[in-house]
Image (spheres, rainbow, N blue to C red):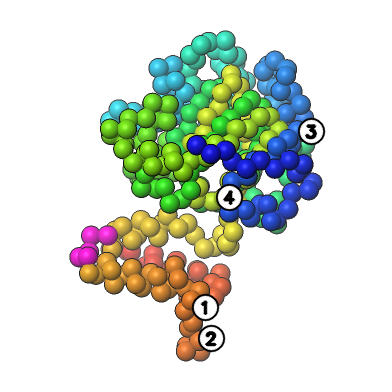
Amino acid sequence: MKTVRVIEGVTPDTITDELLNSNEPLVLKNFGKEWPLPQLENQNISTAMEYLNGFYQGMPVSAGLGDPENKGRIFYNESIQGFNFKAGNAHISKVFERILKHSEDDNPPTIYIGSTKVETLFPGFRDLHFVNLEKQKAVVNIWMGNQSRIAAHYDFPANLACCLYGKRRFTLFPPEQLENLYVGPLELSPGGQEISMVDFANPDFEAFPKFKLALNEASIADLDPGDALILPGMWWHHVEAFQSFNVLMTHWWRPDPVFGGRPIDALQLAIMSIRDLPKEQREAWKNQFDYYVFENETHSHDHIPEKAQGMLHRPLTESAAINIRRNVINKLKY
């Protein structure tokens, strides 16, 4: 596997739009090294927890608990009808207590706090660990827990992922490796996003032979406290947290207006209305999608008066998006 390109000398104050809009993953070494939490990397984990508790206002946090035999893997249960962990709400002090209790275990139960808004959980924390992404309208979340393995998945938005405490490894795949990652159900997944069914710690190449092809295109990004990863949208990433306490802060943003909706919704509608048509009809609809969507830059609609172009006008306006949404909702009613 390859190693993600590493860039030195970029800080939260000097990061550029050019870097943020990179089409390839980039590791920013020591990006937030001067932030308070990464400065505690050599301290006992209880010191880091005490620091975080200083911001906590008592909001219950959603946490997952997995059995030791899962070895940190956040995944489905055997029937693929549920998950291999229990989830519930708890006070952050109780979560930290459990992590501390098992911090010396060779094989601890998995204790995991997934995507949680930083300002909601720890008001004021972001001010001291700040990247100015107001232009991007970034959503800033925090992830915490002990040793964990998060199955390969993609996110539609781009991401600036900052490792604040502990060590993490991202194993990355470009979007075109979808077929070789053996993705699970679209309706049910541990984090709300479809995931690879391959166990990266022990891949079954008989069941998943094409995964070898994916590994040929994989790249590794190892993050120490203070490092950051620029991850373009739609890249698949498997994430491992190695230490008895780990903290990650993510910044998600999408390049287009939020009113555009979620592309996965369009995919699901296409599965419902197009996938099972006869092949020749699917080919005809593929031509329609190429013309109106995927190759739209190469086609002009100037033969239609601009005021009459409606949804064909580029760029799409918010009012046109509202009309499309209303029209689709009405047509989906039985």
Left or right: 269 with respect to 99? left
Q: Amino acid at mark 1?
A: His
Mark before the other along the chain sequence, 1 or 2: 2
Q: Are marks 1 and 2 in contact (CB under 8 Å)?
A: yes
- List x then y, in percent, for residue 327: 40, 70
**Image quadrant occupied by the C terminus:** bottom left
Instruction: Compare residues 54 and 251 and report the one nearer the observer.
Output: 251
Asked which secondary structure carries label 4, the reply is: loop
Q: Which residues are magenta?
A: 275-279
Residue 17 seen in the current view = yes
- Observer-side mark, 4 or 1, equals 4
Magenta region, mostly helix, strand or loop? loop
Residue at horizontal 46 percent and vertical 50 percent from the top: 175
Q: For mark 3, what is the residue?
A: 34
Asked which secondary structure carries label 2, the reply is: helix
- List x then y, in percent, for residue 124: 75, 37
Q: Amino acid at mark 2?
A: Glu
Asked which secondary structure carries label 3, the reply is: loop
Mark before the other along the chain sequence, 3 or 1: 3
Q: What mark, if any, has residue 125 been given in the picture?
A: none
- Observer-side mark, 3 or 4, equals 4
Instruction: Compare residues 182 and 73 and report the one nearer the observer.
Output: 182
- Observer-side mark, 2 or 4, equals 4
Residue at horizontal 32 percent and vertical 30 percent from the top: 204
Image-quadrant location for residue 244 = top right
Q: For mark 1, what is the residue?
A: 313
Instruction: Compare residues 303 and 67 and report the one nearer the observer.
Output: 303
Q: For mark 4, what is the residue?
A: 24
